[in-house]
Each structure stands twice: as structure tokens, then as C-alpha cells.
Image: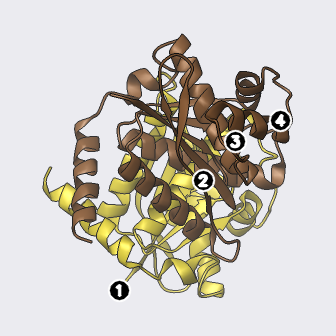
Chain colours: A brown, B yellow
Amino acid sequence: MSTRVLGVDPGLTRCGVGLIEQGAGRSVKLLFVDTLRSSTDLPLAARIAKLADELEQIIIDQRPNSIALERVFAQANVRTVMGTAQISGVVLLLAQRHGIPIALHTPSEVKAAVTGNGRANKSQVSSMVAKILGLQEVPKPADAADALAIAITHSWRMGIAAGAESGSSATRTTSAQEQWRAAIEASKKSK
Amino acid sequence: MSTRVLGVDPGLTRCGVGLIEQGAGRSVKLLFVDTLRSSTDLPLAARIAKLADELEQIIIDQRPNSIALERVFAQANVRTVMGTAQISGVVLLLAQRHGIPIALHTPSEVKAAVTGNGRANKSQVSSMVAKILGLQEVPKPADAADALAIAITHSWRMGIAAGAESGSSATRTTSAQEQWRAAIEASKKSK
């Protein structure tokens, strides 16, 4: 069975999501890429729930084997970092509730893995993502390319060190999680 | 019918939760207070999911009419602020999914409302919380007292300006939310 990695570049206004399939060696294939958005006109709780609903639908539909999330730093832009951290919390929750291992990678780890330079700029990352995945065009906006870069990083790092950071525990599925998943499935069928 | 306000002092290691009942005028009554904890030994996703499960159970069991959450600032302690923001995101999501209006209050708004001084220290806040709620002892740890202070602040501010910040939209319950709630109920019954 193939291994599918969902990369998430967390954000409240734009949240990049990219799914890749891991092949032999370092080969990776693009399966899905999107940028989820929430309007600044909505109240915060509604924005978070909108993104959570869309992320959860992607998890259910695409059934990734693992999720890779960009680690947020408090040193980053103070104006946007709180929303980014809030979405990160939601992604971590969804991963755990769906029993999918999730790992965090720092921006410099992602840049280093994809371009060989931990201080590469956004356009260098986007270009390398297109090259690695054999795409005709560079994925846009940058959030979408970043999500794919995170997924590629995770896929390659997993290949080196099997069993990522949070993977070991996230694969244990508790009874509560099982029930919750059954509830989600039931909810889906009732639509 | 009485109005029940759930205050949440978000945190990854300790998350304070306090439920109060709003009476006539400014009178408030303690219904429930607790401090949820997650071990630093657990992976991040498991910690977040544990707190989310416990918070969600409280929402289901106690059925608050509104939730009040402390607003996190990026300027706060850099080492803990990301976890705090992640839990905030989860609380916002749970509130929206359960169709409960949620509002945010800053630490200085809470201090000012409860003690009359926006720069009051933790012990002054705890003492006033005990006094306002007519408690024999000061609630401990500080996270529990803070959660009650947030709930009291919200209750009093709502009394002044009916319809809080996020209330207007959070009260709209979408079909997806209804289904999700039904799923949660179904999951609960199947336990």
C-alpha cells in the first residue's frame, strides 16, 4: 500500500494543504493541493470552525497515513502568529481524533530538506517543490507550495528515521477516538 | 431559565475551567470549577486531544449558555504561549461546533472587572473571586480562580452590553453543526 502524507501550512486567513504519495526512494507524487481560506469578516470561532470542517473533510476523503505540520514560533509575526497557533492546535486535535500520526517540522528544516538551504526564500522553496513533484507550474499561492514542501520534508525524513516524533503515540487509537470516528462516519452518512 | 457561563483559562499543562450561574443584577453563583491537566510526557497531539475531550465532556454535561475565554497575547511568555494559543483554538472550535456563543476577554479586562484594577496580581484576583462567589476558601490553583474570574467578567460585561463580540454569529447553528452534535450525542449513548 502507498504512503500518503498530508502537509499543512497552518493559517487563519490562508491554510495550505498538500497531499503527496511516497514512492520508491525519494520519489514523491502530487495527489492534491489546495488553500483553505476564512474571511476576516467572520468571528474568530466561525473562522476556526470553517477551516476545521474543511480540514476534517480532507482527512476523511483523502485518508492520509500521516500528517506533517509546520511548527509555529512565537518569534514570528506577532500579528498573525496567534491565529496560526490556534489552527495548529485544531490540526493536532483532528489528527489525534482520527488516529493519524502527526509530526512537526520547523520552517528551516523544511527549507533545508527541499532546497538544501535552511535560509532559502519562498520563491526558491516553491520552485524546488515544482521540480521535485515534476509540475509544469509552481504551485500558488505560497501557502499551497509550503504545504507540499512540508509534506515532502516529512516523507523524506520518515524515510531516514522511521517513526516520526509524535508518530509512536498517535498511532495508538483509544476507545474514545474509535467512538468519535464512528460518530463522524455516522454523521457523514446522515447527510 | 438561568444563564450559565463557562470560563476557560487556556493552557496545555493546566487549563482552568469554571462554571457560574448568573442571577439577578451582578449576583453570580459557583456551579463547577476544575483544572484540567495534561502530562508533558505525552506527545503534543495527545495532550491537546486529552484536554479537548475533557472540555467537550464538560460542555456536553454542563450545557453552558456561553463560553468566555482569556485572550492570549504573543507578548506573553514565549515558552508557554504557543500551547496556550493551541488550546484556545480548540476551545473556539468546540464552542462553535456545539453552537455556544464564545467571547474573548483580555487579562487586564478580567483584572479590572473583578478587582477594579487592570494591573491586579494573581492573589488579588483569587481573593476577589472567592469574595464575589461567597466561597470559604480561595479557589486553587490560580488557573481555576482565573477561569472563574473570566466567567464573572463575561457575565458582568454581558449584562452591560447584551450580545457579546462573537455571540451574534455563534448562535447561528448550521446544518453541519447540528449533524455533528447529533453524532456526539450518538457517540455518548454508545459508551
Distance, label 3 to label 2, CA atoms, is 38 Å
User: Are the residues under badges 3 and 2 in a single subunit?
Assistant: no
The answer to which of marks 2 and 1 sits earlier in the sequence is 1
Callout 2: SS: helix
- Local SS, label 1: loop
Residue A63 x %, y %: 37, 43
Q: Which residue is mark 2?
A: B146
Q: Amino acid type of disc 3? A: Asp
**On the rendered structure, is B116 left or right of B20?**
right
For the residue pair A29 and B1, the one nearer the viewer reads as A29
Quarter-of-image position of residue B180 = bottom left
Residue extending farthest to the left is B190
The residue to which callout 3 is attached is A146
- Mark 3: give few (<14), some (14-19) or many (20+) Cα within 10 Å: many
* Residue underneath mark 1: B1
Given contact means CB atoms under 8 Å apart, are the residues at marks 2 and 1 in contact? no
Mark 3 vs mark 4: give the one in front: 4
Tell me the element at label 4: helix
Q: CA distance from mark 2 to mark 1?
A: 26 Å
How packed mark 4 is, by other alpha carbons closer than 10 Å (few <14, some 14-19, many 20 or more), is some
Q: Chain of mark 1?
A: B
Marks 3/1 same chain:
no
Quadrant of the rendering where the N terminus of chain B is positioned:
bottom left
SS at circle 3:
helix
Q: Looking at the image, which residue is at 47% across and 81% down?
A: B171
Horizontal relation, residue B123 to residue B173: left or right? right
Residue at point 64% right, 36% down? A134
Q: Chain of mark 4?
A: A
- Find disc 4 in the rendering and name its residue: A124
> Can you tell which mark lies on residue A72?
none
